Image: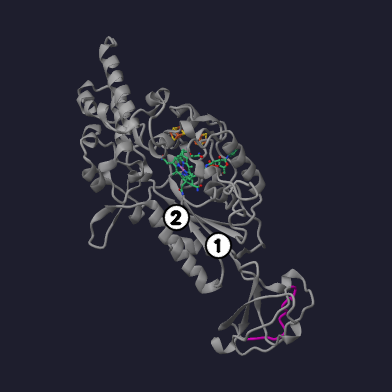
Amino acid sequence: MGSMANTLGLAHSGICTRTAKAKPGEYAEITRETSASESPEAVTCVRFRSWRPQLNTISLYAEKGAIGSVSNTPTSPADLRIPSLDPALVRAWAQEAGFTEAGLVALPHPADARDAARFEQWVLAGRAGSMHYLERRAEDLQLVRARAGTPFPWAHSAIVCFASYHSAQPLSLDPARPGAGWIARYAWTSRKDAAGQQRPSDYHKVLLRRLKALETRLRTEFDPFEARAYVDTGPVVERSLATAAGLGWTGKNTCLIHPRLGSFGFLAVLLTSLEVRQDRPQLTVPDRCGSCRRCLDACPTRALDAPYQMDAARCISYLTIEHKGPIAEQLMDGIGRQLFGCDICQDVCPWNRKAPISADPDLAPRPELVNPALELLAQLDEPAFERLFNGSPVRRAGFQGLRRNLAIAIGNCGQQQFASLLEPWLAAADDGLRAAAQWAIAKLQTAENQPNQP
Ligand code: B12
Ligand code: SF4
Ligand code: SF4
């Protein structure tokens, strides 16, 4: 391959034309910076494919043994033979890498401006609470996350993958024994380690590994190109990209709902500088919420205050995971028994009723985290907390944060005998925990003083 890789001069506006026939296979890759001052006459090699992996480079492919020439004459774009991503192939490779589903979209996507405006409105309405990273602006004052093109001007495509974590375990609204709390389904995950032991797993790591495998697969075919892989933490609105890539629609609960798999799925995004084949229309899934509004009616803190609108600062998921410090008292009743995250607006969604159960070995549910006993969790000391949640998303709440959430859930469970668990927390150094313990003890006392209902 190296022997065929002649170094080429190519005028910036130069266009490759195929002038010789060659046998398929054995491509030689030739990449170099281009500059407008270079003369196209200096060029003497055939190329069969060319594209721009980065703004200032052109990559050319020549078949082994072929001879030909480059002309600077503009030809029609169809003659360029740009190697581009095929949605069906990308989906198959994503599934090989372990994802349940995947979609592909060219950037900027057709709803780019609309979604950027929605994101901006959301931020300007103060709905991000204390998640200030969502409000970051670029030098030109554009919100960094509103459009993938702002932080990643080189990105021409987004591959959006979906990994289902749906499991056969009960839902958060199903009857549970008294004194049981709730940890969100997405945080139950586990996988076997090299020694065959079942260990907590974190979807960020699991999915990032899969995105890297997908990227490696793409590189065997298309290298060189730019790429960035993100699971949750990148500066992109993943649900906007997922909707544009045809994975599903944005439900009134703001979740991405796949028509077959439902919404209990993680999203993972691979941005690339590769083009998308443009010979077929981009398919998207129409909104199938219809007249349903179960999620809005079920949300205990009224975080979903209108269809498709969420005030994150009122969402139990935000309050129990992201928010540090005291929680506003008026929201504590609504938190109910949720200890980490919240599944209510997905548990009531009819599109999750028939969704298949995931058999993903890296996202297997941990039975000990389903309806966990509040009493047991409240007795954990910090080393025991670490042992139970090391490697699990629950660690994000922190030891004090989980205790704060436990205090609220204990207050809401109405079991007077648990008040003794709360008393030591009245002297806690952590403001949030102290305030929650005070509130919970007062609530349990009120419950005790109330006359029994007939
Ligand atoms: C911040 C954040 C949160 C915040 C805010 C959530 C929110 N709704 O904005 C909090 C902490 C509350 C949260 C909670 C949860 N999160 Co979260 N979160 C994120 C994060 C990091 C950014 C989301 C964001 O930018 N929000 C800003 C708003 C504007 O963006 P959006 O809601 O995604 O935007 C869509 C809608 O608002 C919609 N929209 C706006 N206006 C209108 C109007 C109309 C008419 C329509 C049709 C649509 C529409 O358009 C946007 C694009 O499609 C993403 C990862 C990422 N990088 O994207 C994960 C992510 C969205 N979260 C995820 C998960 C799993 C959850 C929880 C289920 C966890 C749990 N069990 O507790 C809950 C679900 C709560 C819910 N109902 O959304 C998954 C969602 C997967 C899915 N199938 O949708 C993501 C994608 C992470 C991942 N990689 O898997 N999350
Ligand atoms: S996750 Fe819970 S609190 Fe947040 S919007 Fe859904 S139902 Fe409401
Ligand atoms: S519960 Fe109903 S309205 Fe809400 S997301 Fe599901 S289908 Fe849409």
Comparing 90 with 334, the one in front is 334
User: The disc labelled 2 sits on which kind of residue?
Assistant: Thr
Q: Which mark is residue 219?
A: none
| Disc 2 element | loop
Q: Over which residues does the magenta segment extend? A: 13-22
Comparing 252 with 409, the one in front is 409
Quarter of the C terminus within the rendering: top left
Distance of label 1 from label 2 (alpha carbons)? 14 Å
Q: Give the residue at x 29% y 40%.
A: 399
Q: Quadrant of residue 3?
A: bottom right
- Above or below residue 74? Residue 69 is below
How was this image coloured?
A: one colour
Left or right placement of residue 283 versus residue 445 in this view: right
| Disc 1 element | helix
Q: Give the residue at x 36% y 51%.
A: 202
Label 2 neighbour load within 10 Å: few <14, some 14-19, many 20+? many
Let me know if residue 42 is in the magenta part. no
Comparing 279 with 270, the one in front is 270
* Residue 136 seen in the figure: yes
Q: Quadrant of residue 273?
A: bottom right
Q: Give the residue at x 66% y 51%.
A: 110
In this figure, which residue is indicated by the disc labeled 1?
88
In this figure, which residue is indicated by the disc labeled 2?
100
Mark toward the start of the polypeptide (1 vs 2): 1
* Residue 167 seen in the figure: no
